[in-house]
Image (spheres, rainbow, N blue to C red):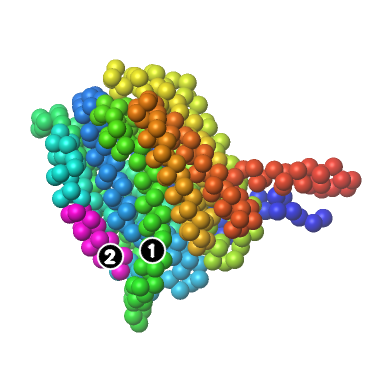
Amino acid sequence: MRRLPGNRASVRSLVRANHGGLLTSALGTLTVRGGSALLVFVSTVILARQLGASGYGTYAWAFAWASVLQIITSFGFDILAIREFATYKERDKWPAAVHGLFRTAPKVVLLGSTVVTLLVLSASMILVEPTQRATFIIAVAFVPLLALTAVRQGAVQGLGSVVAARLPDDLVRPLVFNIFLLIGWSVLSLRHSPPVAMALQGVAASVAFIFGLLVLRRALPPRGGLPHVQSQTRAWLRLAIPLGLLNGIAILLAQVDLILLGFLSNSTQVGLYSTSTRVASFVGIAEFAVNAAYLPVVARLFAANRMDRLKTGAPMVTLGAVLLSAVLALPLIIFAPQVLRLFGSSFESGVFVLRVLCVAFVISAVAGQNGALLTMTKHPRPMIVGSGVALATNVGLNLIFIPLQAARGAAIAWLLSVIVWNGFLSLQVRRVHGFTATPLALLPMLRQRIRNARRPGSDV
């Protein structure tokens, strides 16, 4: 009988040819991210107990700024590397292009990130409060290194080594940071202060960067025998700028609530919110792992003109991420008071915030692959518009709710923004590709299978 898109044949095809290694990459990334989340949890407990809610809030606020500047000053080359390297590999013309792109990207990123860093440091002398200034300056000083790290990570991921791409920053960096915290505060008796903690974080990032360069060197194809290195700097800049804008909006969307809390409330509320965010990020591990493994797959299938595979595969991949996210969220929601008590008594008032953020992560996973279907298929404009709408919504809601409810208000604003963001992106993917990546897209296939199963003589 005629096979339908949702039948057993197409299910099996998800783990064959073009999807080869997807499950392995996703599980590997999930393991790495799980280990990273555990290490970050340990460091957060140490920082929260030693610095208190206010001191940890100062540290988290400065770290949020560094995260925003890192993504902005990557100028989209990290995402471009994932997409283009995977495409080159699919079309079998990648060695020269890979070396050409990777020779251009670090130069542009290093120059741009250095200029931005100097401008921000100059502005901080006027705009940042004296009690936060030292921590802020140390965090921003490492931005060029962090931006180069993002490009290196994208390159290795695009070359197909998804797990190896995550190792330096997900395991090496937090592990080294924890070791430095223990040595610095227990053995060397360094001052227990936000600036010292941020300096140790910067040194850990430097160690991870060196380790990452070794990983990249192993992942890059050999240059031997190539007549020349392809140079398409202007073309790559044109491709990278929209992705850089998209990345900047995305990271602002992820960090603007924390930044606004620092301006509209106080360091204690920032500490409460940041701690709850770190704990709730356990729920986001599933979506992140699936996305990291699926991004190169989407690029390769698009290059091979296999949108039929994406129509069936993306909703199934999303369904797996949603189920796993829900499993991770449930115990955190139930035992939120006990979990937050680990950070100290001053953090127990963050129970509501933690529960709301866990729910937001699960909702985010429902439409988690929509972004990949837009960016990896060279449709960044709808993604930019959707992210911009979500950012504007988030800022507006934060300006309303933070003065009223502080950290609780920021959590509510984030939950509502996630709903708006994912709903808009689902509509955009349907408009561009004619289908969505949400699990709801599987319902018509399921209904068709049920109808076929009821027909006389059906072998489904």
Q: Residue at x 33, y 59 (%)?
A: 75
Is residue 13 inside the magenta stretch? no
Q: Residues within 10 Å of mark 2 (few under 14, many from 20)?
A: some
Q: Residue at x 41, y 59 (%)?
A: 243
Q: What secondary structure is the stretch in magenta mostly built from?
A: helix
Determine which residue is flagged by label 2. 108
Q: Secondary structure at mark 2?
A: helix
2 or 1: tag closer to the N-terminus: 2
Left or right relative to 230: residue 369:
right
Question: Which quarter of the rendered picture does the N terminus lie within?
Answer: bottom right
Range of magenta residues: 104-119
Q: Position of residue 169 (x, y in %)?
A: 31, 47
Q: Nearer the viewer, residue 186 or 235?
A: 235
Q: Quadrant of residue 118?
A: bottom left
Q: Residue at x 33, y 52 (%)?
A: 71
Determine which residue is flagged by label 1. 240
Q: Confirm or deny contact between disc 2 and disc 1 (CB under 8 A).
A: yes
The amino acid on which the numbered mark 2 sits, given as a three-letter code, is Val
Q: Residues within 10 Å of mark 1 (few under 14, many from 20)?
A: many
Q: Position of residue 395 (x, y in %)?
A: 39, 40
Q: Secondary structure at mark 1?
A: helix
Q: Residue furthest bottom?
A: 227
Left or right relative to 109: residue 452:
right
Is residue 118 inside the magenta stretch? yes
